[in-house]
Image: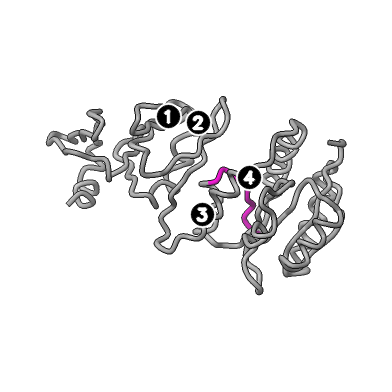
Amino acid sequence: MSSQIRSILVDDEQRHHDILGKMLTTFCPSVDLLGDAYSVREAVSLIDKVKPHLVFLDIEMPEGNGFTLFDHFEDPPFEVIFTTAHDLYAINAIKYAALDYLLKPINIQELKQAVARAEKILTKQAPPRGEEYQVLKENIQLHDKRFTKIALRSSEGIDFVEANRLLRVEANHVYSNFHLDNGKVIMVSKPLGDFEALLESCNFFRVHKSHMVNLSHVDKYIKGKGGYLILKDGSHVDVSVRKKEALLKRLM
C-alpha cells in the first residue's frame, strides 16, 4: 500500500462530511479523501470507482443502516471505521466483531487512534477481514439482542468464539483471559473493564473485580462472607461481598 490511505466518507448529513473531512485533513495527513457518499447505494458505486483502502461509514441513514453496505461485498477489500451518534446496540455488535467505531461528536484523539490502527492493518497487507464482518452481520440480524459470536484478538490472531462457549473471563493486569468450555484459554490484550458492558448482554455478571462469569455455566453457589461459584468445568470463582446480593437475585 502507498503511504496515503485512500478513503471515502459515507454519511447522509452534509455537516458530518464537513466536520469529519476537516478533522481528517487537519489531524490525519496520511488520509487521502477521494469522495463523499450520502447513502449505501452511492457508497457502493463510489467504492467500485475509487477502490478505497478505508471507509468511514455512518450507521444511521434514512434508506437503511450502514451495515447493509456489506450485503454488496462478500469479502470487503477495505477497512471500515464506523461512525454513530448513539446506537448502543450497534456499537456492541461492532465491538463483538473486533471492529473500530467513532462516537459522534467525534473526538480528535480517538479519530487519530482509529486511523493509526487502520493504517497498521493496511500496511501489514493483512488478508480481508471477511470473518469479522460475517460476525458483525450475524450479530446485527439477531432479534433477541443477544450476540452469538465474539471476535477475540490475541497475539496469535483472531478467534471467533460462540458466546455461550465462554465460561468466564479473568482479569490479568492489563490483559484478560477468556476461559472456554473445552479448557482453552485465550489471552486478549485489553483489561476486563473493556468487556464488561459487552458481555452483560450475553448473561455474564461481574462477580469480583477480577472475574466475570457466564451465569449459564454456573452449577452451584456456596455460601460464605461473599461465597463462591462452582462452574460446570469444576472451577471455583470467588464472589465479592459487594456483589453477593445482586448475584443471588440474578441466580434465583
Q: Quadrant of residue 37?
A: bottom right
Disc 3 versus disc 4: distance between alpha carbons? Answer: 12 Å
The disc labelled 3 sits on which kind of residue?
Glu
The residue carrying pointer 3 sits among few (fewer than 14), some (14 to 19) or many (20 or more) residues within 10 Å by Cα, namely some
Residue depicted at 26% across the width and 30% down the height: 233
Q: Quadrant of the N terminus?
A: top right
Residue 138 is tagged as 3
* Image coordinates for residue 58, horizontal then vertical, percent: 67, 61
Q: What element carries label 2?
A: strand
* In front: label 3 or label 1: 3
Mark 2 and mark 3: span between their CA atoms?
A: 22 Å
Residue count near mark 1 (Cα–Cα under 10 Å), binned few <14, some 14–19, many ≥20 = many
- Discs 1, 2 touching: Cβ within 8 Å: yes
Point out the tag, 3 or 1, that comes first from the N-terminus.
Answer: 3
Measured as percent of width and height from the top left, residue 78 is found at 74, 47
Mark with earlier residue (3, 4): 4
Measured as percent of width and height from the top left, residue 213 is found at 32, 39
